[in-house]
Amino acid sequence: MSPDADLLPQAAAHARSLSARFYVDATMPALDRHAIFDHAWHLVAHACQLQNAGDHVVADLAGLPVIAVRGADGEGMPGEIRVMHNVCRHRAGPIAQCDGLGAKSLRCRYHGWTYALDGALKSAPEMQTAEDFHVEDIRLPQLRVRVWQGLVFASSHDDASDFDALVEGIDARLGTTRGLEHYGHHQRVGYDVACNWKVYVDNYLEGYHLPHVHPALNRMLDYRSYVTETHHWHSLQWSPLRTSDDGSSNTLYGDGDALYYWLWRNTMLNILPGRLQTNRIVPTDVGRCRVEFDFYYPMDDSGQARAKREADLQFSDEVQHEDLGICEDVQRGLASGSYEPGRLNPLRENAVHHFHELLRRAYRDAMAGAT
């Protein structure tokens, strides 16, 4: 079988974007699940949300519902963080439907099957007449877990890519003053967007649209100094924060750089002085995705800190609505039948090219495995 011409590698200086069919074809969700997400490392939570035994966070890993739980290490002391399938082994009911604190056990709301914090089934009501049914034989499947910079990642496959390679070099770039493990969780904000998940990632990966879509953000960042770096499994966009005309610091974030990390496949870390914002893109259909933001700040509840958090949330919401609008417009353009792959800007869209090359390779490998 000859390779799909759309999936052949492309040199950055001559690269074109992906064909529209990869964003609009009805078969893409199944291919993306198999080729892209099943073997991925997914961001689930921050360790600050799982401080005590029984604290738990629910998440959707591109179609796989999971629950991250802090276990009990004897005498009620906090123990291991586990990430398990949030799917009851009885008839697929949800073990938990929202985040929670201090649970003693995990109880499916469909028929009341109850699991220990380590995923072992503890009780199954009225199953006494079921022959050869043994509670001790049943437990929730567990995922591999890595906690890095305080962030909890999980993968459902043993052959997931090397996690250390995924984040290689980021620790050194953040240094000791911008480490993410000391932040506290403040708020989650979600947006349902009428675009394919790849449209949103494409948009995230370039600052080329800043002067045209984000007037306020463009005033905050120094577009002339905006740099995009690509690494093997992640990319970084960064820019100095602009000072005021009188040379004073940025009023919202102070001095420093804005760092925008994208981790293959659908995780973003938006790091500004005094703030971490994580961003997960969850595909829900070929033309729809959900964008989930979690906001983390230093543990400071002073009036000034609360005011800055509120201003940050409002500014982020303004920027996101600008992005969501243009992403939905792009999805309509891709679905129109008019679009043919356009040339990418080698200077401003090198991270888009990097993402597309990773996609092309994943699709080639998946299609080769199916033949």
Image: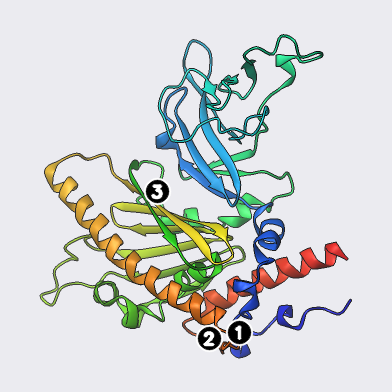
Residue 346, numbered circle: 2
Q: Which of marks 3 and 2 precedes in the sequence?
A: 3
Q: Which of marks 3 and 1 precedes in the sequence?
A: 1
Q: Position of residue 321 (x, y in %)?
A: 33, 66
Q: Position of residue 273 (x, y in %)?
A: 29, 57
Q: Report helix, strand or loop for mark 3.
A: loop
Q: Position of residue 205 (x, y in %)?
A: 48, 71
Q: Position of residue 51 (x, y in %)?
A: 42, 29
Q: Report helix, strand or loop for mark 1.
A: helix
Q: Report helix, strand or loop for mark 2.
A: loop
User: Based on the displayed image, in which of its 4 quarters is residue 173 positioned?
Assistant: bottom left
Q: Disc 1 marks which amino acid?
A: Ala
Residue 179, numbered circle: 3
Q: Quadrant of the C terminus?
A: bottom right
111 or 180: which is nearer to us? Answer: 111
Disc 2/disc 3 C-alpha distance (Å):
31 Å
User: Based on the displayed image, in which of its 4 quarters is residue 119 positioned?
Assistant: top right
Q: Disc 3 marks which amino acid?
A: Gly
Residue at the far left in the pictured view: 246
- Is the Cβ of the residue at disc 2 closer than 8 Å to that at disc 1? yes
| Image: 170 above or below 72 | below
Crowd tier of the residue under label 3, counting other residues whose Cα lies within 10 Å: few below 14, some 14–19, many 20 or above: some
Residue 12, numbered circle: 1
Q: Disc 2 marks which amino acid?
A: Pro
Crowd tier of the residue under label 1, counting other residues whose Cα lies within 10 Å: few below 14, some 14–19, many 20 or above: some
User: Based on the displayed image, in which of its 4 quarters is residue 287 positioned?
Assistant: bottom right
Which residue is drawn at the image coordinates 15% and 41% (left, top)?
Answer: 302
